[in-house]
Image: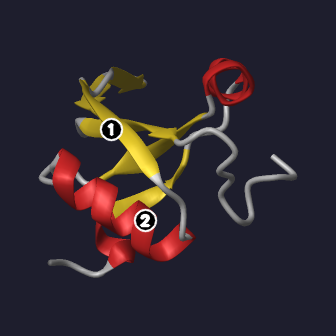
Amino acid sequence: MKPPHHLIKGPIITEKTHSLKGMGNKVAFRVDVKANKIEIRKIVEEVFKAKVLAVNTVKMKGKKKRLGRSEGIRPDWKKAIVTLAPGEKLSGFEAI
């Protein structure tokens, strides 16, 4: 298994993920495109010491971007929405 910093790139902090945290005890992460649900579950339970109920993943398509006449495309990425057990919290995410 890869080290945690290779699979989990960082948290996704938006209004939508903030409301998910309050309503359903869910946290969103930006993860490696090749990571699967089982690896994500193991890494979150190992690093944050929290019980994970479910992991949902979404492949996000990269957007087209322009800079003057030249056109490029941002890379594709993957989002993981992790559902925690009732009463569980991730250390370091209480302030967010």
x, y percentage for residue 70?
Answer: 29, 28
- Image point (48%, 74%), residue name: 47
x, y percentage for residue 31?
Answer: 33, 51
x, y percentage for residue 24?
Answer: 61, 23
Q: Nearer the viewer, residue 82 or 15?
A: 82
Going by the picture, which residue comes out furthest to the front? 86
Quarter of the image where the N terminus is located: bottom left
- Amino acid type, residue under disc 1 in the picture: Val
* Mark 1 secondary-structure assignment: strand
- Give the answer, above or below, for where 5 lies relative to 90: below
- Amino acid type, residue under disc 2 in the picture: Glu
Q: Which residue is mark 1?
A: 55
- Give the answer, above or below, for where 58 lies relative to 93: above
Could you say which quadrant of the image residue 82 lies in?
A: top left
Left or right, 80 with respect to 27, comes to: left
Q: Nearer the viewer, residue 21 or 86?
A: 86
Q: Nearer the viewer, residue 6 or 92?
A: 92
- Give the answer, above or below, for where 79 lies relative to 66: below
x, y percentage for residue 90?
Answer: 65, 58
- Image point (21%, 60%), residue name: 39
Q: Which residue is mark 2?
A: 45
Could you say which quadrant of the image residue 85 lies in?
A: top right
